[in-house]
Image (tube, rainbow, N blue to C red):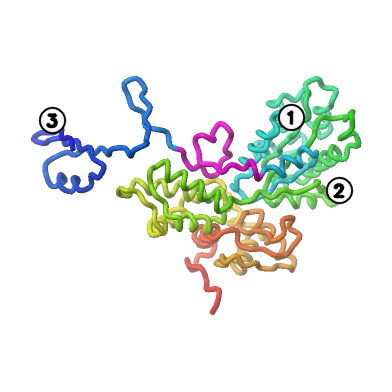
Amino acid sequence: MTHQVCQSRSIPRRALCLMITSQCHHFTTFYSQRPYLCMIVQQPPEGVKRVRTGDNLVQPFLKRFRPNSTVYMEMRSFVYYADQTDNNKPLVQRIHNGEFIRVFGARASGKSSRIVDAMEALKDVYECLYVDFTNLVLSSEEAFWSSLCTLLKLGGTPLAFNSAYGFRNAFNTEHKRWTRPVVIFFDEFDRIHDPYAVEICSSMLGKLRSIRNDPSRGSDRPSHVIRSIVSIGTYAILQLNQTESMLSPFNPCGNFQNRSLSMDQVRELYQEFAADRHMIIDNDVIERIFSMCNGHSGLVNICGVALEKSLSMMRLPLRITVAHWESIVNKVIVAMESYGTFQRLIRDLHGDSEHQKSALAFYRSRFLGNTSDMTVHVSAYPNRELARYLVALGLLIAEEEDGTGDGFKVASPLMDSFVLQSVIPSVYRNAPNTSPPLHN
């Protein structure tokens, strides 16, 4: 221990004690009973490297959990991320085959980040264009195509357009701009599923259908350079072919479901997190996090943020036990309310429309508290439509990937707890704050 005593006008008759130790809480108790100002500096664990810049020592950068955001390639060194390269191989192969694909999954489940991986794998062969539909104007059909043109201009499309015909013409093989086949990714594609976007939805799906069915595709002299179009969104994109009954169904060659993280992937993320901070996380804690989140990428990251925030209140040596995790679980649910994805979920379940009210009442009566991975069969209309709506919101999981079946189950215990604590009390004022028993 090193002591350094100094006199100061602002600190009369007191000494400044600088303690450098690896276990300093014993000394804190001793000096807190005496007229000292104590500065405690912990010795760094072995293996931690610091970077010297000039005369200063810079603390090493630590990765962070980053919920509710797309993890671009430039960010991979700064955040905890589960590599999806192997899981993406079937998707990449379908794109090579020229298929038009719908990639669907729950909100904040890592769909967009997965697409970034796919684009990285394709970039040497194709020109990949990415458009986020949240940035498009849906006030009218012309405004929609004009705003799409503006975003595609960033990728160098050679023509301005404000119609479906102009969109198709911008990718004509006659334009010298195009030297390679093009793959277009439409993210948040389910936005055109909204009731006020019926005409836009019909126009977009009609044009995609005509491009896909162009007889010149795959020939030696194709009329356009589009190899594949991938639409990304929630479960709602599987229902887009029902928007306009006058058109034939929009049936791409295949759907691709965005899978949740596996137990091994979640364990690897948290073990890396623990190693970076020279701490221990009990394996039971990681298993509980996986079970609570059911591998949902966004929820796994939110749990990581909560754990990291809790470290400042812990004594050395740092070890996350089940007891510690249980003490901060409620903070995870509160933290979920601060993210846009879950704020939107609250609005979708708290709306005034009969459909929204019926959906929440249906979830409350058939699924709330049912977190045992048991499938509930819903065959009668309109309850099955309500169940599909809840799947689109990320509260339920459909038993059949394409949604044609009648089996549904709760997406995860954490999502169920979020509805119980953050949604239902504001809608049902007299509702209990605990789940009802499943059996008498």
| Residue 6: mark | 3
Q: Amino acid at mark 1?
A: Val
Q: Amino acid at mark 3?
A: Cys
Q: Position of residue 33 (x, y in %)?
A: 13, 47
Q: Secondary structure at mark 1?
A: loop
Q: Which residue is mark 2?
A: 247
Measure the C-alpha gap from mark 3 to mark 2: 84 Å
The nearer-to-camera label among 3 and 2 is 3
Q: Position of residue 46 (x, y in %)?
A: 34, 38
The nearer-to-camera label among 1 and 3 is 1
Q: Position of residue 316 (x, y in %)?
A: 30, 48
The answer to which quarter of the image holds residue 7 is top left
Mark 2 Cα shell of 10 Å, populated few (<14), some (14-19), many (≥20): few
Q: Position of residue 230 (x, y in %)?
A: 73, 40
The answer to which quarter of the image holds residue 369 is bottom right
Q: Is residue 263 left or right of residue 220?
A: left
Q: Which of pointers 1 and 3 lies earlier in the amino acid sequence?
A: 3
State whether the magenta stretch is mostly helix, strand or loop.
loop
Q: Is 432 included in the stretch rendered in magenta? A: no
Residues shaded magenta: 63-87
Residue found 87% across the figure and 35% down from its top? 217
| Residue 272: mark | none
The nearer-to-camera label among 1 and 2 is 1
Mark 1 Cα shell of 10 Å, populated few (<14), some (14-19), many (≥20): few
Is residue 338 shown above or below 39? below
Which quarter of the image is occupied by the N terminus? top left
Residue found 80% across the figure and 44% down from its top? 202
Is residue 68 shown above or below 375? above
Q: Is residue 326 left or right of residue 298?
A: left
Q: Which residue is mark 1?
A: 125
Camera-side residue: 72 or 48? Answer: 48
